[in-house]
Amino acid sequence: MPSPFPGMDPYLEGYLWPDVHTALAHKIRQLLAPQIQPKYVARLEISVIEDESFEAEVGVMYPDVEIVEAEPTPEAVGGVMVAEPAAATAPLTIPVPQVRLVSVEIRDVAENELVTSIEIISPVNKREPNLSRYRQKRERIRNSDVHLLEIDLVRRGSRVWEYSRIPDVPYVVILTRAAASTMEVWPIELSDALPSLPVPLRPPDKDVVLDLSAALTTVYDEAYYQLSIDYQQDPPPPAFSVGEQAWMRQLLSTEIEE
């Protein structure tokens, strides 16, 4: 059963997102690799970072994480002295979740040099302190004569781009070509199909095409995400606008009736 949404499925933005993120990166590599060989290869770049501000995601991306308060240690009874006092029990146990982030790198075969970086933005990238760290990373990439394709399919947090002219829509894809003074922007509404994107290589090689819709649709089907989603409940936060909520209710009611 395919997703009822024509583009990004907002129900994937919650606790399923880590799985979606990883699977989407693998699928993007699979779709691009045949188009760019034998001159280029697509490789996965994997990093693990601590989610230092994880409290914002408890109940959303981390539904089972909680801060545990220890039971108070009983006092001695009857004035009996303990020969060797036990170590004090910490009053709080605070988890520090680790997030596995996967990006896709296109490298040239001859020198193994990075040509294009494809970043799938995660909620942890969109809040401090990792928001500032990601912005520093993207500046390093942009200053390294490397193409940068950024795919943001989650609504929580702050946008990683500090440009007021980017439309206020749920999802955005931005391509910054190496040495370019402009960015190519794909604003994506909730009702929009995901675009087919150009993926630049080195001149004189032409762009190849990433069918983002096909990538996400295949990931959804292969993972059977519909078995983990209750479409009669509200999607993960933040809340949509009144108009978007009405459109979504109509869409889902039609799917349920069918």
Image (tube, rainbow, N blue to C red):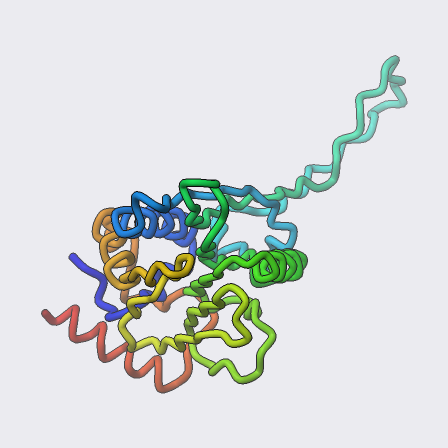
Nearer the observer, 48 or 12: 48
The spot of residue 104 in percent (x, y) is 42, 49
The spot of residue 181 in percent (x, y) is 55, 75
Q: Residue at x 42, y 46 (%)?
A: 108
Nearer the observer, 230 or 131: 131
Q: Which quadrant is home to the N terminus?
A: bottom left
The spot of residue 214 in percent (x, y) is 23, 59
Nearer the observer, 175 or 254: 175
Q: How many marks?
A: 0
In this picture, residue 234 sits left or right of residue 68: left
In this picture, residue 154 sits left or right of residue 137: left
The spot of residue 101 in percent (x, y) is 49, 47
Q: Which quadrant is home to the C terminus?
A: bottom left
Q: Residue at x 29, y 77 (%)?
A: 191
Q: Name above or below for residue 227 compared with residue 70.
A: below
Can you tell which quarter of the image residue 240 is in? bottom left
Nearer the observer, 79 or 83: 83
Farthest residue to the front: give it.
204
Q: Residue at x 67, y 40 (%)?
A: 93
Q: Name above or below for residue 56 compared with residue 68.
A: below
